Image (spheres, helix red, strand yellow):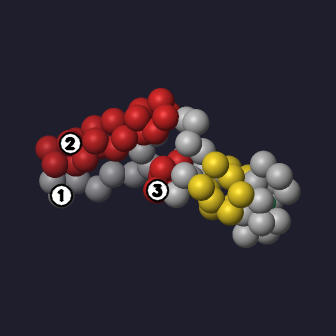
Amino acid sequence: MAGVPCPSCKNPISLTLGFIIENPTSQCPHCGVVMKFKEDKELFDEYRQVMKDIEYIKKQHKGVTFGNQK
Ligand SMILES: [Zn+2]
């Protein structure tokens, strides 16, 4: 998943869904705006489930190298 641009200054920041989940409150390095992502609980739950599924698949296919997961 590609990172999203800052909602305030539109500068590209490496803000991925995984990073947001780890850091629900993030600060833009360009303009300093603070972004809070706590609202997207359903999205987080979905993301966690997807990550679980990927881990499960990986365990079943040891030694197989995965490319970009969609
Ligand atoms: Zn910004």
Query: How far apart are the two marked residues, 1 and 2, measured between alpha carbons?
Result: 14 Å
Position of residue 27 in the picture relative to residue 37 (left or right): right
Q: Residue at x 34, y 44 (%)?
A: 51
Q: Residue type at mark 2?
A: Tyr
Position of residue 41 in the picture relative to residue 54 (left or right): right
Q: Are marks 1 and 3 in contact (CB under 8 Å)?
A: no
Q: How crowded is mark 1: few (under 14 residues within 10 Å), some or many (20 or more)?
A: few
Question: Horizontal and vertical percent for residue 34?
Answer: 71, 57
Can you tell me whether the CB of the residue at mark 2 lies under 8 Å from the nearest atom of ligand 1? no
Query: How far apart are the two marked residues, 1 and 3, measured between alpha carbons?
Result: 28 Å
Q: Residue type at mark 3?
A: Glu
Question: Horizontal and vertical percent for residue 37?
Answer: 60, 45
Q: How many marks?
A: 3
Element type at mark 3: helix
Question: Of all residues shown, which one is farthest toward the right?
Answer: 9
Element type at mark 1: loop
Question: Horizontal and vertical percent for residue 6?
Answer: 75, 54
Mark nearer the N terminus (1 vs 2): 2
Question: Of all residues shown, which one is farthest toward the top?
Answer: 42
Residue matched to label 2: 56
Element type at mark 2: helix
Residue 52 lies in what quarter of the image? top left
Q: Residue at x 39, y 51 (%)?
A: 67
Position of residue 55 in the picture relative to residue 60 (left or right): right
Residue matched to label 1: 63
Question: Horizontal and vertical percent for residue 35?
Answer: 68, 52
Residue matched to label 3: 22
Q: Which of 34 and 17 is in front in this view?
A: 34
